[in-house]
Amino acid sequence: MQVRDVLRVKGTVLYTIGPAALLGEAVKTMVELDMGSLVVMEHGRLAGMLTFREVFRVLAQAGTNWQQVAVGSVMTRKPGCGHPDMELDDLRRTMLDGRVRYLPILEGDTLMGVLSFRDVAKAVLEEQSFENKMLKSYIRDWPAQEWA
């Protein structure tokens, strides 16, 4: 299964924020949308990723002024990225090796979507379920042979 297949099922709705936005606004958006990350876009291009990990880091360091911190100063710049033609196993390895839960998917300079580790786990589970059903059907319908 390719990343392109997972994106097709998930859809291509993207939630973005600019690097000049304040962290308080970003957190409010993430809570309202029940999202663990936001893509940071600048001039129509991927500038970085903001995840709850960066938010927690700022909370621990900035104290009561965390809401006034600019997203651009805490986002992950140049995040690792996947591409639509990657095999899902390669994407999982990239996410595990990079210790990331959210990975932007780029085709050239175009952001195609963001996949979470949950999206990947769901796709793998569905693929395995389908294969399991097909194998059981194949075994069930196997012609009985008489051995003389």
Image (spheres, helix red, strand yellow):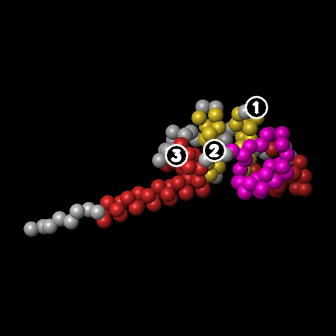
Under circle 3, the secondary element is: helix
Decide whether residue 95 is among the magenta residues: no
- Decide which of 45, 56 is in the foreground and name it: 45
Left of 135 or right of it: where is 119? Answer: right
Q: For the residues labelled 3 and 1, say whether their Cβ atoms are less than 8 Å apart.
A: no
Whether residue 143 is visible here, answered yes or no, is yes
* Residue drawn where x is 84% and y is 43% of the image: 21
Q: Label 2, label 3: how many angstroms apart (C-alpha)?
A: 12 Å
Which residue matches tag 3?
5
Circle 3 or circle 1, nearest the eye: 3
60 and 20: which is toward the camera: 20
Q: Amino acid at mark 3?
A: Asp
Query: 83 or 148: which is nearer to us?
Result: 148
Q: How far across and down, in percent of the image, does residue 116 sit?
A: 62, 51
Vertical arrangement, residue 124 with respect to residue 146, above or below: above
Q: Is residue 137 above or below residue 100?
A: below
Q: Which residues are magenta?
A: 14-38
Identify the disc placed on residue 43. Answer: 1
Of callouts 1 and 2, which one flags the residue occurring earlier in the amino acid sequence? Answer: 2
| Residue type at the position of mark 1 | His
Q: Residues within 10 Å of mark 2 (few under 14, many from 20)?
A: few
Alpha carbons under labels 3 and 1: distance apart = 28 Å
**Residue occupying the point 71% across, 50% down:** 37
The numbered mark, 2 or 3, whose residue comes first in the sequence reads 3
Query: Which is nearer the eye, 66 or 118?
Result: 118
Tell me: 108 left or right of 124: right
Where is residue 147, by image quadrant? Answer: bottom left
**In this rendering, would 14 be left or right of 89?**
right
Is 33 one of the magenta-colored residues?
yes
- The residue tagged 2 is 12
